[in-house]
Amino acid sequence: MELFYGRMSGNSARSLFGLHEAGVAFTPRLLDTRGGENRAQAYLAVNPMGKIPALVDGDFRLWESNAINWYVAEKHPQAGLLPATIEGRAAVQRWLFFQAAHVSPACGAVFRSTHRGMQEFWKMQADEKAAEAGRKDLGRWLPVLEGALAGREWLEGAFSLADVAYAPHLWLLRDGGFDLGRWPAVRAWLDRMYARPAWRRTADAVFAG
Ligand SMILES: N[C@@H](CCC(=O)N[C@@H](CS)C(=O)NCC(=O)O)C(=O)O
């Protein structure tokens, strides 16, 4: 199994975290996005969108970070990254869609303007109007996570792909100085998540230095 990923890429971090949590053997393939390696023909054959991450497992090719994590979790059920029941798996799916459609876009709008490392790496311009809109959206989405985490350690009780999905973009948000003080359960959840060895390895590979 090979995972194509890039530096300073939250979506890459999501899949690296998922694979490390699953404990699977894989070959990491670091792409030089600044040099355009992700837009070269060889990689477009893996992901026609030219985005990272992407997975190759024999003849099977898959892109979209949450789809990659789902495939790996289904293939390695012993890792326990998905609930056993249909209801539990549907609930995890709900968190993945909520992350991709709502929480990540709001985080991105903010950290594009606040995270120096991301701005430098991706040559992004700060956009204070977009950041303000992102902060407003987060004021609506973070209470949803806060409520779900009341009295529990992980979104669906046991640690699952639901938690994995949120790690990277909330990391970048927090690293950019966003104050999570109004959402103590979210803050404690992130502290637990970022202490996991699989996240430490991921953050070192994607965000360090
Ligand atoms: N929805 C996709 C998003 C992938 C994505 O946007 N990746 C960014 C890096 S975080 C990328 O490849 N950017 C480079 C480009 O668009 O050329 C996923 O979750 O995998």
Image: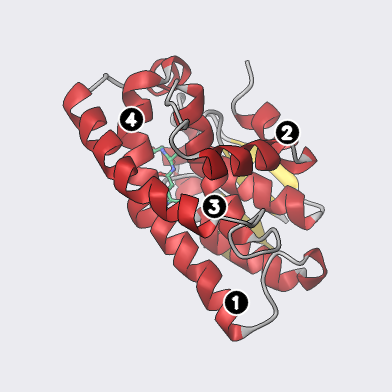
Q: Nearer the viewer, residue 47 or 183?
A: 183
Which callout, 1 or 3, points at the residue further toward the start of the chain?
1
Q: Whole-percent x and y of residue 99?
A: 43, 54
Q: Are marks 3 and 2 in contact (CB under 8 Å)?
A: no
At label 1, the amino acid type is Gly
- Residues at marks 2 and 4, CA–CA distance in whole angstroms: 23 Å
Which callout, 3 or 2, points at the residue further toward the start of the chain?
3
Q: Whole-percent x and y of residue 189?
A: 61, 44
- Residues at marks 3 and 4, CA–CA distance in whole angstroms: 18 Å
Would residue 46 appear left or right of 136 to someone viewing this image?
Answer: right
- Residues at marks 3 and 2, CA–CA distance in whole angstroms: 15 Å
Q: Whole-percent x and y of residue 73?
A: 69, 66
Q: Image point 41% across, 55% down: which residue?
A: 144
Q: Quadrant of residue 75?
A: bottom right
Q: Is the CB atom of the residue marked by disc 3 within 8 angstroms of ligand 1's nearest atom?
A: no
Q: Is residue 158 visible?
A: yes
Q: Which residue is mark 1?
A: 88
At label 4, the amino acid type is Val
Q: Residues within 10 Å of mark 3 (few under 14, many from 20)?
A: many
